Image (tube, rainbow, N blue to C red):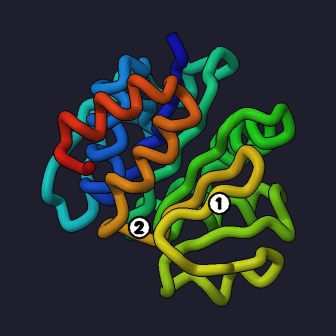
Amino acid sequence: MNKAYILLAEGFEVIEALATIDVMQRGGVECIRVAIGNELNVKSSHNIIECRADILLRDADLADGAALILPGGNPGYINLGKCEQVREWVRRYYDEGRIVAAICGAPTVLALSDVARGSRITCHSSVREQMTDYNVVGGNVVEDSNLITGAGAGVSVEFALAVAARLTDTETLARIKRGMEVE
């Protein structure tokens, strides 16, 4: 079974994180929720929910993962980018050819991690000007090599399905889509 790690920072976007966790679960992908702060309970943006992580980043070894997923949300993506340990894992995953998936404002963490410069990406319109070293092509979801980026909350399921397509087989992906009435 493939394993994905989703990094949860205070202020994460609810739908971006939970849609991805849900799709991974439907596909049989083990999706480990990692809190980057000091508490397992992580508050979402707008204080909508509190999500309980499985492990704290400071205690985690993410070396066995196939994908590293970074949801956006404000200030979630800012908090991700401020964390040196997050940036180290982003660099490691990207350099090792493993999937790095970032949605909404989280592609800014790529820039802060000094990875994937020149890559084709999409991101939330509010952070486009921060992505000057990238080829921002827009659109809902953009894949470039081992990088998957999503524009924002409204394309969360599409983003999650793109990640699932890399971690599962075509039959499993078709089953997920049928179950979610996507196709």
Q: From this viewpoint, which residue is outermost toward the left?
A: 48
Q: Quadrant of residue 44?
A: bottom left
Q: From this viewpoint, which residue is outermost toward the top?
A: 1
Q: Earlier in the sequence, mark 1 or mark 2?
A: 2
Residue 75 image label: 2
In the rendered structure, which amino acid carries the disc numbered 2? Pro
In the rendered structure, which amino acid carries the disc numbered 1? Val
Residue 46 vertical placement versus 113 (above, below) = below
Determine whether label 1 and label 2 are within 8 Å by CB: no
- Depth check: give the residue in front, 70 or 49: 70
Q: Position of residue 171 (x, y in %)?
A: 41, 24
Residue wearing tag 1: 109
Q: Quadrant of residue 60?
A: top right
Q: Quadrant of residue 35?
A: top left
Residue in view at x 50 percent, y 10 percent: 1
Q: Position of residue 126 (x, y in %)?
A: 49, 86
- Depth check: give the residue in front, 99 or 183: 183
Task: From the viewer's perspective, tell me whether residue 142 is left or right of residue 63.
Answer: left
Helix, strand or loop for disc 1: helix
- Mark 1 or 2: in front is 1
Q: Is residue 64 visible?
A: yes
Residue in view at x 33 percent, y 52 percent: 157
Residue in view at x 51 percent, y 69 percent: 105
